[in-house]
Amino acid sequence: MRITNNMLINNMTYNLNSTLQRLEKLQYESSVGKKFRVPSDDPIGASKSLKFNTDISKVDQYLRNAKDASSWMKETESALKEINAVLHRANELTVQAANGTNSQDLDKIKDEIKELKGHIIQVANSTYAGRSLFTGFKTDKPLLDKDGNYNVDLNSNEIFVYNVGVAEAVSVNILGNKVLGSVDASGNPDYVSDVSGQTPGATPTDPPTPGEKAYLIQIFDDLEIALDTVDQDKIQQALGNIKDSMNQVLSVTSEIGARSNRLELTENKLEDQLITLKELLSFNEDVSLPEAFMKLTIEENVYRASLGIGGRIIQPSLMDFLR
Amino acid sequence: MIFGFNSAVRGLLASQRALYTTNHNIDNANTRGYSRQQIEQRATSPFKLPGVGFLGSGTEVYNVERIRDSFVDLKYWNETAPKGEWELKRNTLNEIEKLMGEPSNNSFRKYMDDFYKSLDEMSKNPSDIAFREPVRENAIAFSKHIQETAKRLQDMQKETEYTIEMKIKHVNSLSSQIAGLNRQIYSQELDGRQANDLRDRRELLVDELSNIVNVKVNESSEGKYDVSINGISIVDHLYTNKIYFDKEKEGEIFWENGSPVNLRSGELKGLQEMYIGDGQNNSYRGIPYYMEQLNEFAKGFADKFNELHKEGYGLGSSNKAGDFFTYDINSISATFTLDKSIIDDIKNIAAAVKEGGLSEDNGNLMALIKQRESKTFFEGSVSQGTPDDFIKSMLSSMAVDSLQAKRLYETQELIQKNIETKRNSISGVSLDEEMANMVRFQHVYVASSKMITTMDTIIDITVNRLGLVGR
């Protein structure tokens, strides 16, 4: 084949250009740390990255949701514990009263019971970040008024959920009446029915007007009267009621504890997922730096070599040797 | 004696012409489209001397020939057109890819992720304005991104239109130039010799033309030069057939007489496909295709999202909420934005599923978030599934097309480069060769002049020194 000068030069520039293109790509890869800059560099990888990034964003959000749910639950749990402590104290006092102490002591007990009642109302109205814990969807309102009447109506479906997975949601709140109860038509506690704010047993009318007494407060009210009148029967009855309420509070506490535990497991799982996803993403689109650097060095050598050789080949001609 | 002089002068003249040709070659070593020239030399007619035989009478240069292989030209033109086409498609698709912004923090995925993230965040405290605000802001960013992408696609469409017009002007100018050269070459070649440099120039013009459109060249035995696109002459010896672009008629390109130009390849074909290709009926996926996809996405997303949004209630509202997104049906993605009610008052974001829009009621938000996973979010013919699926499929079809264009271009470039090398090997000027020739011709020139000196000496001796007897 006949070789002309321009062929040599064209070949050299073409080859130098291809080497430079590879160098540029490697330079981009090692300086940005990513394997591709447009999807066509790796269509499958790019669409995988798309998925991983979205998944990471979702899992990240789920994790935040789980953490927020968990704080809410912790707050609920501590409120419940406090109610439990109050009930313990009330139990103690009631036992003392039932054991027949003198009327001066009964007065003191009565005063303390009154204080405890106030404390329960306070705890029932406790908030998390300015939002009432026990009021269902109406977190902008307190649960009980100062007399212990429900300030809001509570529907059993007013449970809000947070997403902690694609198809996994966790119920976050506990309705107040599940802890405090309402008084049903026969004067027994009702922890299940919606609180309509109506007088016990009445059929709800629209719109409901809050005002129904919380069962737990009713116990305290009854106890106060019993202490006032020194009615041992009633005191005994109150003792039983307090015990029952304590059981109820405990059962709710354990329910939320169980929920919290499950949430913790979910959180752990999500954290694991996040790490796995980040690993996958990194594996998918991140450049291994040592490898990139090695490749860069190789290409650099190729470039230097082709520059050197090109320079030597295109330089001389017959003219240099003619006199 | 004079006979010897004549013969020597012929030698001188021939070497001189050979040297001129060498000079011409060296001068044009870097001229684009130039093919090296060679003199053709032969011995002049001999004298028949009875009893002696044929006595040589010297030499003559009877032709200057250009070294060129028309078969290589043919291949060059055939392969240049696809190269032009794929180069253009590669560049345009690359631009579209960059416009979509994946992988980066300025992509659909990112904006959608952010939007849904803020929805999820809001679901935890739907009554708090501080949690509603990000939803509106992220939704605006998301809609702005769609708008901007649509806008840039439209700009690209306009640019493509402009480029088509430019290319067509160029094609018409090239065809006129070729026709002009045809006239010149035809008239100069009447004596049967080839007008080398003019022919080089004409072929260079065809080179240029073949990058834009697919051409076939046919030169008749009487020297009529015909250039055609898919069987229809664009240059018919001295006449040209102009083409024009009509954007009103779906971006078609027409001949002077109104019939459409059927392009097989070339830059113009690439441009045209990017300009009108909507991916339907096996047509190429050009800019309109991506605009259509974007519209379909924007419309589908807005409709489904609104549908569910309207089921819910705004904060403290006892009326069902209105739309969340809105658009103008005539140019969906370019006008895709938030509904006025949301922009005016973020309380109108329907978080609640129950009438009254209670503080903590996030039922509708949960439904909206869940909707993202709905496999029936999009039920169109092309893309189905979730919004993420839609974006993914749009992106991967783009990536695959772009990769294909890139690969085809690279292949075509290599093929074309090989042909060019071949052409260079045949027609290119080699300086070493020319130097060697120069020395060769110089030697003959020197020898011929020596011949004249020799003759001169002989005559000098015969005339001046012989026959001293008579003095």
Image (tube, rainbow, N blue to C red):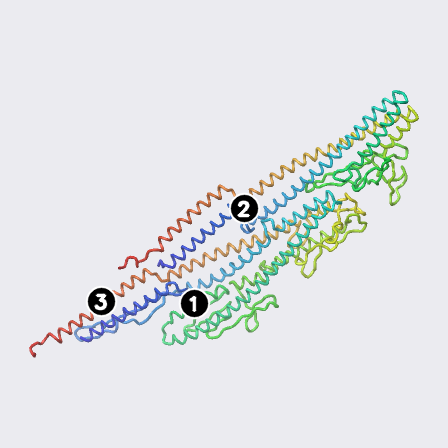
Closer-to-camera residue (A254/B356): B356
CA distance separating discs 3 and 1: 39 Å
Q: Is residue B277 above or below residue A124?
A: below
Closer-to-camera residue (B307/B28): B28
Q: Which residue is mark 2?
A: A34
| Residue A159 found in image quarter | top right
The image position of residue A216, as x and y in percent, is 85, 32
Q: Which mark is residue B203?
A: 1
Tell me the quadrant of the picture where the N terminus of chain B can be found: bottom left
Using residue A231 as the reference point, say whether residue A272 is left or right of it.
Answer: left
The image position of residue B50, as x and y in percent, is 18, 76
CA distance separating discs 1 and 2: 46 Å
Q: Which residue is mark 3?
A: B447
Residue count near mark 3 (Cα–Cα under 10 Å), binned few <14, some 14–19, many ≥20: some
Closer-to-camera residue (B315/B19): B315
- Look at the numbered discs 1 and 2 and tell me whether their residues touch, using CB distance below 8 Å: no
Mark toward the viewer: 3 or 1: 3
> What residue appears at the point 74 percent right and 41 percent down from the top-left corner?
A161
Q: Earlier in the sequence, mark 3 or mark 1?
A: 1
Query: What chain letter is assigned to the residue under label 3?
Result: B
Element assignment for label 3: helix
Kind of residue at badge 2: Lys
CA distance separating discs 3 and 2: 71 Å
Query: What chain letter is assigned to the residue under label 1?
Result: B
Kind of residue at badge 3: Ala
> What residue appears at the point 37 percent right and 71 percent down from the top-left corner?
B194
